Image (cartoon, rainbow, N blue to C red):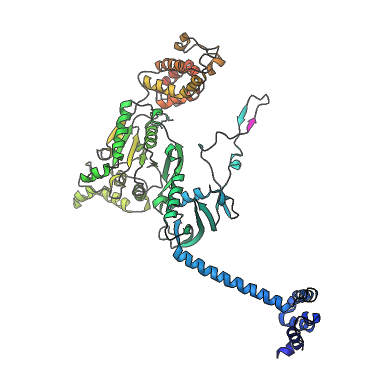
Amino acid sequence: MDFNTLFGGALPTFVANMTNGASNETQRSIPEGIMESLGPLLGTQFNPLLKTFMLLQNIVGSSLGLDPTVILSVFGFIWAANKLSRQLYMTIYGLTQQYLTASICISNNDEMFLHMMKWLSSQPTLVNSRLLTAETFSKTMWEGEESLEIPTTDIAPDGSGIYLNFSNQEAKAPPRFTPAFGLHGFWFGPRYFRLHRKQESLYDDGNSSGTPQFKDKEKLVISCFGRSPEPIKKLLQYAKEQYYADHHAKTTIKRPAPQNMRRYGGRHSWLQVANRPVRPMTTVVLDVKQKVQVLSDMNEYLHPATPRWYANRGIPLRRGYLFHGPPGTGKTSLSFALAGVFGLDIYVISLLDPSLTEEDLSALFNSLPRRCVVLLEDIDTAGLARAPDAPKTDEKDGTADKKGHGKDKAHNKDDWSVSDLARELKRQSGPDDKKGISLSGLLNAIDGVASHEGRVLIMTTNKPEALDEALIRPGRVDLQVAFTNATQEQAMELFVRMYEADSKGVAARGRFLESAAEPRDGDLSDGSTEVEEESETAPVSPEELTKIAAAFSAKIPSKQVISPAEIQGFLLKRKKTPRRALAEVDVWVKALVEQKASKTKVLQVQ
Ligand SMILES: Nc1ncnc2c1ncn2[C@@H]1O[C@H](COP(=O)(O)OP(=O)(O)OP(=O)(O)O)[C@@H](O)[C@H]1O
């Protein structure tokens, strides 16, 4: 079939019309027969479209006096120019990318990803862009809560029970917005940067996890014009500094990550669980000599020149402290205060964690940062027993190896009993023997080959006598700090600390003697004096506070039977009424001493 037959004889007319120029108006319109010819060719569904097009062509041709072929040619030219310019742009862009821009790629496996995302989420140009990702973002207790207006619930009809209500607090927390996947641009100083946020699915063959699966990984590619990556490096450094800007005032607390995350190692081994304001050293009530001793020892150890000093003498670069004493005497508090003083993160490990194996413990120690505090709390409760067949000598120095197999080596093969055999079989069988930490497992982690040097290890215990001597021998524990129940001086210090911030405020406002219900000196020594409701809450001057504190401490037994935590608990219940605390201390001390003597756990007075 030729074209003429196809177009039903209309083609010659159409061609003639087109070639005859634009002078004749009838010639500018599309020949009528062409519709019928194109219809079957394109299919019936295109008919309305074709008709509309033809109609438009006719209108344009006849009413505007334009030749449709010219219009088509113009459109064709624009299309071709567009294609060409795109091609050109792509080529120039590709060449520029290859030879004239620098890029740095950041994977979400790295901390730098967090720094960058936090910085990007604070950039107005980016958070006002049209392509965003919203993330639920919970604030910690210490972030901008004070100015929040919290609704109250009135549960008593007479209005006497008005309480704060936090039921919708999550709804009020605004989400965080970050640039969505795709291309973005932003300015940093005088320079323009391009950001490409990408997501890739990687296939994990299951070597580490046991189950093959696809995992999503994110990447940020930051590029800038110029052959040097220096501007991007500066940007990354800046983002990192911003990220840690408020860290000098905070102590970051980390714990081992859940088991399924730990297997990725590196920064996945540890999970940040809190970022608390630094605990000032002055808030820990302890003998000044002891405080200074620990502080100066740690300061010396953390000095940049110390690693070389240790290396020159072939001494492993480690420092261990044992804080021992009754419960609630400030062992953990001192650990946190020390981390705060030296600006170190604190890594807390619980040896009672059932998911923690000895391999995990070694891996955790191995992934510690260069300088940090590792806190092993209540080490005596971890059931760290020397293997029953392990020798009494220090495993490092003795013939025994770290897994407690020493005796086996010395064992005469002929002496094997059935129980030895059963024990050996148990040790070698099943996955259960991998659970829990043995003494040798802990020693391995603390000072084995894999152990990270440079860290400060703090172990706390209520029962130092229950610890194996291998655990606390010099080299593993270099300094012991004894904590005791509160002395009278400590009780006084605790009392002053509890109320001094308020009393300073009183001094500043010059309201020392404002209250008419101010107790006389005689009242202070007599704790049983009934204190009027309004005088209890009346402001206390610093001078008066010292007097009340002295009177209070005199009522604390000098035999040190009450812990600082107990005193703190008592004062907290009267946190705005120092006079009431003084008035009620006698009854409380008596009840507490009796309760301790009778070994009951139930408090009569709180
Ligand atoms: N010496 C102290 N100075 C200041 N506060 C103290 C002191 N001892 C205890 N406290 C307070 O008591 C509470 C418990 O203290 P902390 O956890 O430090 O005691 P601990 O000795 O570690 O107890 P445990 O042996 O039970 O772990 C904390 O809130 C802390 O502020």
Looking at the rendering, the stretch of residues picked out in magenta corresponds to: 147-154
Please state, as top left, top right, bottom left or bottom right, where the N terminus lies in the image.
bottom right
Residue 473 in the image, given as x and y percentages of width and height? 25, 38
Viewer-side residue, 98 vs 280: 98
Viewer-side residue, 506 vs 262: 506
Q: Name the dominant secondary structure of the magenta segment.
A: loop
Q: Is residue 604 visible?
A: no
Q: Horizontal placement of 485 versus 214: left or right?
A: left
Residue 439 counted in the magenta span: no
Quarter of the displayed picture in which ligand 1 can be seen: top left
Q: Horizontal placement of 332 versus 144: left or right?
A: left
Q: Is residue 550 visible?
A: yes
Residue 73 in the image, given as x and y percentages of width and height? 68, 77
Q: Which corner quadrant of the image does residue 389 belong to?
A: top left
Residue at point 61%, 42% (across, down): 171
Instruction: Residue at the far front: name it.
Output: 23
Residue 553 in the image, given as x and y percentages of width and height? 40, 18
